[in-house]
Image (tube, rainbow, N blue to C red):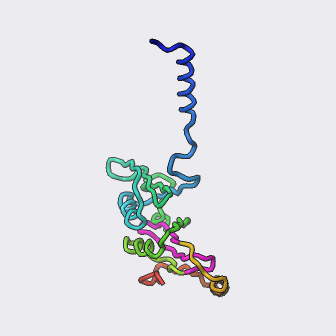
Amino acid sequence: MSETEPTKAKKKSSLRKKSKAIPPIPKGFHSVTPYLVVNNGPEAIAFYKRAFGAKEMLRHSTPDGKILNAQMKIGDSMVLLSDEFPGSDTKSPISLGTSTVTLHIYAKDVNKLWEQALTAGARIVMPLNNQFWGERYGQLTDPFGHRWSLSQQVKMSEEEMQALEKASVEMLGQGEHPVRLEDEQPTSGVG
């Protein structure tokens, strides 16, 4: 038995509606997604797996192994990555000599994630400590020049928070900053 013309038209219309319903943001992504440029993408992906528990979701490589585009998931967030390519105007922090962005990770156990990142090869920029805004917070630099801050909210009294804020304001007033130069790093940042 063959379908009637109205039934066929209804199915085609239904298929067109479904194909038009492509979500503007891919599944698993949020509105803002960092895109890192590195030197040696395969090593960077391996580092992010060890340091932050990243899960590689997708990888497009050149025949010589450079990363054209990769997708990793860290926690519930996607991070995109590619190698630096000659002639491109996007450069890695190592090529620039600095990073202009800090990527922030909230963790359920920031002490554990901090030690995991240090063991994987991250370097301390600002030691992990309780901060006046009610978080345990510190900053690291990865071997590819990207800066990361790691944090979790912690229970603190108003008095503790006010004392830490006062100390921070005094330090900044004296021209000091809590972020250490890399050559002044302590060997462990968990305090």
Q: Which residues are magenta?
A: 130-151
x and y percent of residue 84 in the render? 44, 56
Observer-nearest of 147 and 167: 167
139 in the magenta segment: yes
| Badge count | 0
Observer-nearest of 98 and 32: 32
x and y percent of residue 134 in the render? 61, 77
The part of the image, by quadrant, that contains residue 161 is bottom right
91 up-or-down from 176: above or below: above
Outermost residue to the left: 64
Residue beneath the point at 63% across and 83% down: 157
Relative to residue 128, is residue 174 drawn left or right?
A: right
Quadrant where the N terminus is found in the figure: top left
Residue beneath the point at 60% across and 84% down: 176
108 up-or-down from 180: above or below: above
Residue beneath the point at 60% across and 81% down: 156
x and y percent of residue 91 in the render? 48, 59
20 up-or-down from 93: above or below: above
64 in the magenta segment: no
x and y percent of residue 142 in the render? 44, 69
114 up-or-down from 13: above or below: below
